[in-house]
């Protein structure tokens, strides 16, 4: 073999060995919280942006981080295979980003309470978080081990209630003592508190997705009641309460919404046409109409309780956009297209029946993903789990109408 061929072979060998070593590092350090498919399915990044992204998940020594970042950039450069289709926006939004302290915690479900307090949960970090949105200061309260909270909701006194998805508990943080008051669900098969909301009478309604139940807890009597849902495996997911007290629930496992009477807990099934589909979440507008994301088919839907009419509109990015979180804010219906990279925020105008959408950036990389968003009069609060970012989104001006 001549010298040149030998040098080429050696170069190739060295290169392959480095690549294999780096791949091994990725397998070792990037699979503790999720599978490697997250990397395959990402929008790909430059070396700099891969660094920014993983620095929000895990702190690694330079000797490990740098080869990982180089390997990711060479094998997963920016791509467009999950790119969104945007609808030209007429309005401007302002997005303020708050980065949660513990890395890789799967920060989610921020909700604004009293005095500018915003609460979130770290689902895999097993904690409840408090952001003072005026000062930007953040505090994290470790939850009892094994809680793995799915969400947090505020009662009328501004007290944060968590939903213990892994250990069948709900509870609240006592602000006087900074201790948690925990209630265990009294039924063995009521396993996974998921998403909740307080009714005007003070009762706490919440879904249990895998248990196929809705529960209502009375904080005064400390008693739980359960609603057995008529469709098997319907996976009750999002829940909202109508101003008239009726409880509406989205089915993540069936083509339905449920309408539950707060008085006798009777259930009415609203069948959404042209299933099968999954419906993650819903919200209720000022007219009392129910808006839902048809996540499985990439549609936005409206159900009008007075007439029973259901109308659905295709989302800008189409059938596989997987709209996920939804909220009514100002006079529009807002949701995200969670399967797109970069992820989008979309506004639907019910009057003109038109969409406008924006690419969402989180912590200077365009990543995802939003699973819940809730609005106040002045802002939408959302999160992006990949970077542990809480997002305060505000409409700043209307241009064309
Ligand atoms: C401590 C936990 C943790 C570790 C370790 C971790 N990640 Fe993540 N990562 C997350 C969380 C949380 C998400 C959001 C997943 C979700 O919401 O489903 C995420 C999402 C991602 C995504 C998807 C981004 C998007 O939205 O398209 C990529 C890519 C990714 N991680 C790469 C990596 C790489 C590379 C490593 C190793 C260097 C790594 N992660 C290690 C917590 C972690």
Image (cartoon, rainbow, N blue to C red):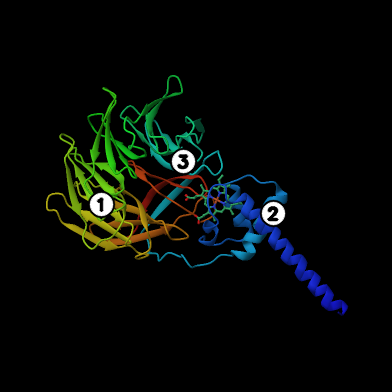
Of residue 401 and residue 225, the one placed in the foreground of this image is 225
Q: Which residue is mark 3?
A: 123
Quarter the N terminus occupies: bottom right
Q: Position of residue 238 (x, y in %)?
A: 31, 46
Say which residue appears at 53% left-offset and 67% top-offset: 79
Q: Position of residue 298 (x, y in %)?
A: 33, 61
Does residue 360 appear in this view? yes
How far is the residue under mark 2 from the one under mark 1? 46 Å
Label 1 CB sits under 8 Å from any ligand 1 atom: no
Mark 2 or 1, nearer chain start: 2
Alpha-carbon distance for marks 3 and 2?
28 Å
Residue 367, numbered circle = none
Q: Residue at x 47, y 29 (%)?
A: 144
Examine the image and state in which quarter residue 323 appears.
bottom left
From the viewer's side, name the closer residue of 388 and 365.
388
First along the sequence among labels 3 and 1: 3
**Disc 1 marks which residue?**
291
The part of the image, by quadrant, that contains residue 265 is top left
Which residue in the structure is indicated by mark 2? Answer: 66
**Residue 72 location (% of width, % of height):** 62, 60
Badge 3 element: loop
């Amino acid at each position: 073999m001549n010298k040149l061929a030998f040098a080429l072979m050696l170069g190739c060998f060295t290169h392959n060995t480095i690549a294999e070593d780096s791949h091994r590092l990725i397998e070792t350090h990037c699979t503790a919280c999720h599978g490697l498919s997250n990397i395959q399915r990402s929008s790909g990044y430059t070396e700099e942006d891969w660094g920014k992204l993983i620095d929000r998940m895990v702190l690694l020594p330079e000797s490990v981080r740098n080869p990982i970042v180089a390997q990711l950039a060479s094998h997963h450069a920016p791509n467009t295979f999950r790119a969104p289709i945007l609808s030209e926006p007429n309005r401007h939004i302002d997005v303020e980003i708050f980065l949660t302290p513990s890395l890789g915690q799967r920060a989610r479900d921020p909700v604004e309470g009293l005095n500018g307090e915003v609460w979130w949960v770290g689902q895999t970090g097993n904690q409840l978080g408090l952001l003072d949105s005026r000062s930007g200061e953040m505090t994290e309260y470790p939850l009892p081990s094994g809680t793995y909270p799915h969400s947090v909701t505020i009662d009328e006194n501004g007290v944060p209630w968590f939903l213990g998805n892994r250990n069948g508990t709900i509870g609240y943080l006592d602000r006087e003592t900074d201790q948690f008051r925990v209630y265990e669900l009294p039924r063995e098969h009521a396993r996974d508190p998921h998403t909740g909301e307080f009714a005007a009478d003070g009762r706490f309604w919440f879904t249990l997705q895998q248990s196929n139940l809705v529960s209502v807890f009375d904080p005064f009597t400390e008693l739980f009641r359960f609603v057995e849902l008529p469709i098997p495996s319907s996976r009750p997911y999002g829940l909202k309460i109508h101003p008239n007290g009726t409880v509406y629930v989205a089915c993540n496992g069936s083509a339905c919404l449920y309408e539950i009477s707060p008085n006798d807990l009777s259930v009415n099934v609203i069948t959404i046409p042209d299933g099968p589909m999954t419906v993650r979440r819903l919200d209720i507008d000022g007219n009392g109409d129910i808006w839902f994301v048809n996540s499985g088919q990439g549609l936005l839907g409206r159900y009008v309780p007075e007439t029973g009419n259901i109308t659905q509109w295709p989302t800008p990015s189409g059938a596989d956009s997987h709209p996920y979180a939804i909220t009514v804010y100002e006079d529009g219906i807002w949701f995200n297209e969670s399967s797109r990279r970069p992820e989008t925020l979309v506004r639907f105008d019910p009057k003109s029946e038109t969409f406008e959408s924006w690419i969402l950036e989180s912590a200077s990389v365009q990543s995802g993903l939003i699973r819940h968003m809730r609005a106040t009069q002045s802002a939408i609060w959302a999160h992006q789990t990949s970077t542990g970012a809480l997002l305060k989104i505000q409409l700043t001006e209307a241009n064309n109408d």
